[in-house]
Structures are given as structure tokens and as C-alpha cells.
Amino acid sequence: MCGIIGYIGNKTLTPLLITGLKRMEYRGYDSAGLSIFQEGAIKTYKKKGRVADLEAITNEVESTSNVGIAHTRWATHGFPNDINAHPHNTANNTISLVHNGIIENYASIKQKLIQEGYQFISDTDTEVLVVLIERFYNNVNDIENAVRLALNEIRGTFGIALISIYEPDKLIAARRGSPLILGIGEDEYLVASDAAAIIEHTKNVVFLNDDEMAILTKDSFITKTISNVQTNNEIHTLEIELEQIEKGGFEHFMLKEIYEQSTTITDAIRGRLLIDEGNVKLGGLRQVQDKLRNAKRIIITACGTSYNAALVGEYLIEQLAHIPVEVEYASEFRYRSPILYEDDVVFVISQSGETADTLAAVQEAKNRGTTVIGIVNVVGSSIARYTDAGIYIHAGPEIGVASTKAFTSQLTVLTLLALYLGRMKNLSIVEGIKIARELSELPKKVEEILQSTDKIEKIAKEYSSSRNYLYLGRGFNYPVALEGALKLKEISYIHAEGYPAAEMKHGPIALIDENMPVVFIAPKDEIYEKILSNVEEVRARKGKVIAIVTKNDNQMNHLADHVIEISETLPILTPILSVIPLQLLAYFTAKELKRDIDKPRNLAKSVTVE
């Protein structure tokens, strides 16, 4: 969470920092601030609220140097207010620091510093770190060594950037567990939590590793471990364009990303689907092919929307490849003693590739000697670099906090994986060709859904005053029910629950009355008749039925209050289509309620702290 940007170079500073924060605001938007040099002193501006509120008080600010840091916050320690906003400075304004992460032992360090006479004004853990750096500087008179000594004292996670009047021509950055990249420009360097903040200036980047720091000047940069061993990091070229992180005429990023899904599904398939062979080519798995062929069990671990995708993956892999699959929340996996065997394979799924709990699950599995494979979106992310092998989903930058196109891209890649494993096992070429052909048709069928959204918008308006929703699905579409409910909760703040349809009778049916909208994901498949029975049970209790159905479903047309049609496809592929109307239902409901759709309250795009 939180967004950090730092710059050293020759460009006009304040507008650059503000623009960088705006491009990362989906990482946190409780407060924002920046520190620059003015007349030989550090001047800090910070404000509760959005980056626009910070911009309003810095419009006329001019810096006398070209080095500065800025931050947009997702609050962990301390309420969102002006005082707790970053940057945090020493009492005499000699050092200014921005931080993403959590310092777990801050309380004990703070108590010790108070006993030594140091004072604090905020409730944050970050202020403890900047004061600790000052304490070490008073002993060693070298800012780089002071940072290194302080970082060796703390436990927890951090991505930091700092400036100091002691060495005003330097910008220092470091990371442990929180993402941080360096942008390498011409006579300029940047540091940021996210590529979105620097793509306007350079595509050449260095990904900092854990327990690594960077010392930047206008003319050079050097990277070292925090134990003072110099490192040589490879420079990578980003493959994203500036227009990908702009709205492109859409009212919200979420709507733009919903409409991009026919393209992103195509991109996930491109170069991988061998239709005539009924097979899949996944170059990122070549080095672990034998491990996958001999796998006795697959564990998939993830959080949030990625967890819902993993549940679909469980159904897919077990049906096509007949390999047992277990799906676990990464946040639980890391805190128990999972039983892992040598012939297990662990898959981790994360859009950002930086999810803290999922990264911890990677480390837990690797410590136990298990092969770990990543399914991520962001090239060069921590999970992409720390796993043994992986598959990129190629969804492109996803700015809306509520994930949409990443989910369908994850489902597409999981389908490719299941087909790949199935053909590696006993799935026939005939069945493989059938699946491959249908998969290649999905982008066109997605376009058909997106060409007729008026009905969904009308349904959203009709039920926008409802305070509770129930989402029900069976088989492959049970996880879609979970995802549909999650989307509605995230951006409209309406309480919603997803359940397997048959479980309705085991409790949730008590909630159903004439005020309860119930969304059924009910495509024509082998358990369609069971869903019809569940619909009848809701109707008998006067619940309002909204059904996602296969085109020309006359039976459901007579039962449901509202039907939303999707094209016919194979049952295993229906989740990729059936989730899109649910994304739109959530979007139009939130719009009707005038919610802040791209920046829903209390949320951030990338969960990089516990």
C-alpha cells in the first residue's frame, strides 16, 4: 500500500512529484505530502485527503533544488490527519523520510528514544524510524551509514526514501518486503513504489531486492545491501505505455478495465494456445515441466479476488488433469504449519506480484523445499522474481482498486494451465481441440456482453437502495458468486454474500424476503436443473431473482425477475463470461449511489502490509 516517489535531477520538482502521486493514488489516499529543499532547508507540505488537496497548497511552491520525496498514504499506525501524513521529519528538520510498510518493533524503539530525550509529534511508526536515523547520524556523521545502522535495528517491512540537509545532493532509498523500483533517466533518477509513477520519464528501471538500498545523485546511482555489500542490479525495460494508465475517455478506470477484457483475454491467450494440437505452450513453465508432470498434489494460495480465481482453478485442474488441488488463503497459509511434500507444487496468484501475505507464502513453501510457481500480472514484481517459474497474465496496468480485467485474465491463464496439465496427463487431443477452440472464441463473446449493458444498468438502479444481496452459484460458478459479492461490497458498500446455491438452505435462506435481491449464476450446464430448484425456493419466499443465463433460456425467463444473457460456451469456460455482468452490476450500483468507484473507502490496490 502507500505510494512513494522520489526524484533527483534537473526537472521542475513539485509538479513532477504531484503527478507521480496522482498516478499511484490507488495505492492509498488517506493523506499526501512532499518534502523539498527551499533556501537550504527542508520544507514539508502535507495534507489529509487526496493528492488534489496537497496540490492545492503546493501550486505556487518552488524548490531551490531538484531533489525531493513525496507520499500518498494508506493509514496503518495513526488516524488519517495532517500530522500523521508523510513525510516525517526529525525535530530540527534535518532529515525527511517517506515510508511504506510496518515497523513491528517501533514501540520498544520509541520508548528507548524517549528515554534518551527525543520527542515525537505523530502516532506513526515511521516517525520512529526517522528519529532513529538521526540518533545514529549524531554518532557517525554520515547519512548513508546512519540509514544502514537504523534499518538493521528494525523488524518489519519497509520501502523508504529520504533526503537530508547533511547531504542535500543525495536521495537514499531502501526496501524490505515493500516494492521499490529505481528509474534510470538521463542525468536524473527516480525511486517509486510503482512503475506508473515513473513511466512518463523513463522505461529503464532497476528492481530493488529485499534488504537492499540505493544511493542516488544527479550523476550516478549505487546499490548495496544494508550490510554494506555492493550489488550489481540488471537494468530492465518496462513494457507499458503512458496511455495504458490513463482513462482514455472513460468516466472511471474500473469501467475502462471492464471494457478492456476482450483484449486482455486475447493477450493472455496469444502465442500460447495451439488449437490444432489441442494443447498449450507455456514457456515460463519449461524448467519445471517434469515437476508438474510428476506432481501428486497442487496447492494454490492467494488473497482476495485472486483467491476466487484460484477456486475456479481448482475445479479446472481437477476436471481436466485429475490432479488433487487445495486452495488456501495466503494469509492463513503463512501462519500455520502446512504439510508439503517433495512432489507437491505450489502456485501463488497475485495481480501486483507484491501482496505481502502471498510473498510470505512463497517464502514458507520455498523454505520447505517445494517448487513454487507464480501467476502474476506485473513484470519484474517480487513474486515474479522469487518463484521458481511462472506465467504472466498480460492484463496490462490495472488502476481501479476493484480488480476486473486481472480476474478474467487469471481465469484464462488457469484454463490454459489446466489444459496444459490435462494434455500432459490423459486428456485426449479431441477434447483438447474442443476446449482450445472454445477458449479462442471467448473474446468475441465478451464483446457481445459489453455491447448491451443498458439492462444491467437498469437493474442496478432498481436495487441500489437494497442493503443486502445474496449471490448463488454451483460448480465452476460458485467462485463467481463469491467474486460478484466481493465486487459489490468493495465499491458500493452494500453488504453481499456469495454461497454455493445448495448451501442457501443451510442458513442464508433465513434472510430472504421481498427486499432481498438474489443473484443466480445459472448457465445451461449439467447442474442447471438443480439451480432451477434453488430459484423456486427463493421465489417461494418472495425474494427478487436476478439470473445470469445462457442465451435463449426460456425456463429461467419465466422464473426470474430479471435475466442477463451470456453466450453459450463450455461449462468450464462460463466463469470468464458470467463474471462480467456482475462487474457491471457492481459498477452501475456504485455509480447510482455516487460512490468513489476507483478509490473505495478503506481499500488500496496492492496490499503490501499485513
Image: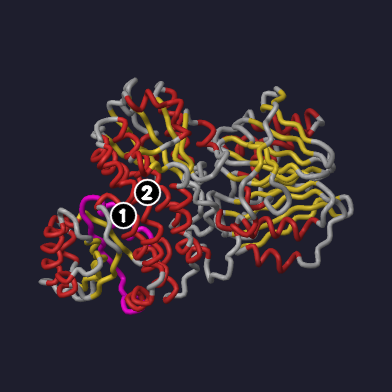
- Residue 425: x percent and y percent? 27, 30
What element does badge 1 sit on?
Answer: helix
| 277 with respect to 594 (left or right) | left
What residue lies at 49% left-to-right and 51% top-to-bottom?
Answer: 395
- Which residues are drawn in magenta? 461-487
**Left/right of residue 137 with respect to residue 356 in the rendered view:** right
Residue 479 belongs to magenta span: yes
Circles 1 and 2: CB atoms closer than 8 Å: yes
Query: How many C-alpha atoms fall within 10 Å of the one at disc 1: few (<14), some, or many (≥20)?
Result: many
State the residue at coordinates (35%, 55%).
576
> In the drawing, does residue 267 fall left or right of residue 227?
left
Q: Is residue 33 above or below residue 306?
A: below
Q: Residues within 10 Å of mark 2 (few under 14, many from 20)?
A: many
Q: Amino acid at mark 1?
A: Pro
Residue at 43%, 53% in the rendered image: 265
Q: How many marks?
A: 2
Could you say where residue 33 lies in the image, as x and y percent from the top left? 68, 57
Distance from the alpha carbon under mark 1 to that under mark 2: 8 Å
Instruction: Report if residue 157 is visible in the image.
Output: yes
Q: Which residue is mark 2?
A: 411
* Quadrant in which residue 221 is drawn: top right
Circle 1 sits on which residue?
A: 575
Q: Nearer the viewer, residue 36 or 95?
A: 36
* Residue 516 locus on image (x, y percent): 23, 71
Q: Please state if 534 lies on the left or on the right of 371 as rendered.
A: left
